[in-house]
Each structure stands twice: as C-alpha cells, then as structure tokens.
Image (spheres, rainbow, N blue to C red):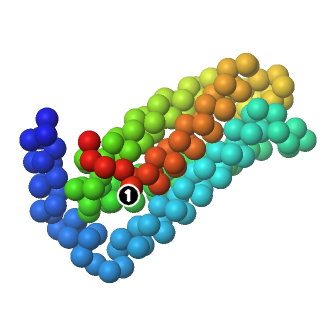
Amino acid sequence: MNTVVNWVIDTLNSTALSGLVMDNAYVFPFLEMAHFVGLCLLFGSLIVVDLRVVGVAKSVPIDRVELFVRFALIGFAINLMSGALFVVGDSDRYLVNIAFWAKIGLIAVAGLNTAYFVRRIKPQMDLGVASADLSRDARVVAWLSLTLWTCVIVLGRFIPYVEDL
C-alpha cells in the first residue's frame, strides 16, 4: 500500500499542474481564498437550509430556502476544484495525512446524507410543507448535515498539524 501511495505522490509531483500550484507565488494563495469562499457558500447555505428544516425561523416559507441549496452546490464545486488542486500541488502533505483521509471519509458520508435529503426531504420542501409537518427523518438529516460539515471543517484545519499515517 505504501508503495502505491508513494507512486501516486511521485506521479502527481512530477506534473506541470503540481509545479504551477506550488511554484507560482499567486496560485496557492488564490486557491486558499477560493476554498474559503467556497466554504462560506457551502456551509453558510447549509446552515440556512438545515436550521430551517429543524424549525428555526418558522415565518420563512420552507420552499424559499431552496435558493440556498444552489449556493451550497456552487460552494461545494469551488471547494472540490480548489481541494483537488491542493492535493495535486502538495500531495506529499495530503495523501499521507490521517486528518485529510478522515475529512474525505466524512465528505463521502455527507454526500450520502445529501443524496437522501435530495431524494426524500427536498420533494416535501418543494411542496411547501411546513417544517413541523416534514417527516421526522428530515430533522435527523439536517442535524447530521450540520454535524458532518462542521467536522469536515475542523478536520481541514487539522491537516497542517497532524502527522503522517
């Protein structure tokens, strides 16, 4: 396994894209800013949607928070692209880091949670169902979403400080 990881790291480090990310004084800081903006869009939007689903701000029609789902998707796309470039540019740091792999695992679980939300909860929201009338699992999905994404953020902050696998 370690040989495969080393091969992937060596392969990524030898690409022109890795050189661009790590050797250009502007690219890495730009990616950091883009990742932060994406995080703000993603998590800020999820806070609005998930808290509304659990019953906060009951005077706001639940179907109106759908706009924020789009912003969350835009934020996720920004973070996916900038995060992938971080990995390509500095694979020595990321691919051997347990906090990075834990973060990726939680993102996968959050993705499954989101898929469940889109398939089961969002149709109820589209019909204008009041949050009190949403199915019980809607609140579980919303709290799980907030918890998972908070943990993803914390693990992302751990990456520079955690040792190798």
Quadrant (top left/top right/bottom left/bottom right) for the C terminus: top left
Amino acid on which the number 1 mark rests in the picture: Pro
Residue furthest out toward the bottom = 25
Give neighbour class at mark 1: few <14, some 14-19, many 20+ (Cα, 10 Å): few
* Camera sees residue 31: yes
Residue sitting nearer the eye, 111 or 156: 156
Q: Percent x, y for residue 68?
A: 67, 49
Estimate the x, y position of residue 60 in percent, counting from the top left: 85, 43
The answer to whether residue 137 is above or below residue 29 is above
- Residue 114: x and y in percent read 55, 33
The image shows residue 98 at horizontal and vertical percentages of 33, 42
Give residue 2's quadrant in the image: top left
Query: Where's the N terminus, which quadrant?
Result: top left
| Left or right, 18 with reference to 54 | left
Q: Residue at x 71, y 27 (%)?
A: 139
Q: Secondary structure at mark 1?
A: helix
Q: Residue furthest right?
A: 59
Question: In percent of the image, x 75 and y 34: which residue is there?
Answer: 53
Q: Which quarter of the figure has residue 39? A: bottom right
Query: Which residue is under mark 1?
Result: 160
Residue 147 left/right relative to 15:
right
| Residue lying furthest top | 136
Viewed as shown, does residue 138 lie left or right of 150? right
Q: Residue at x 42, y 72 (%)?
A: 30
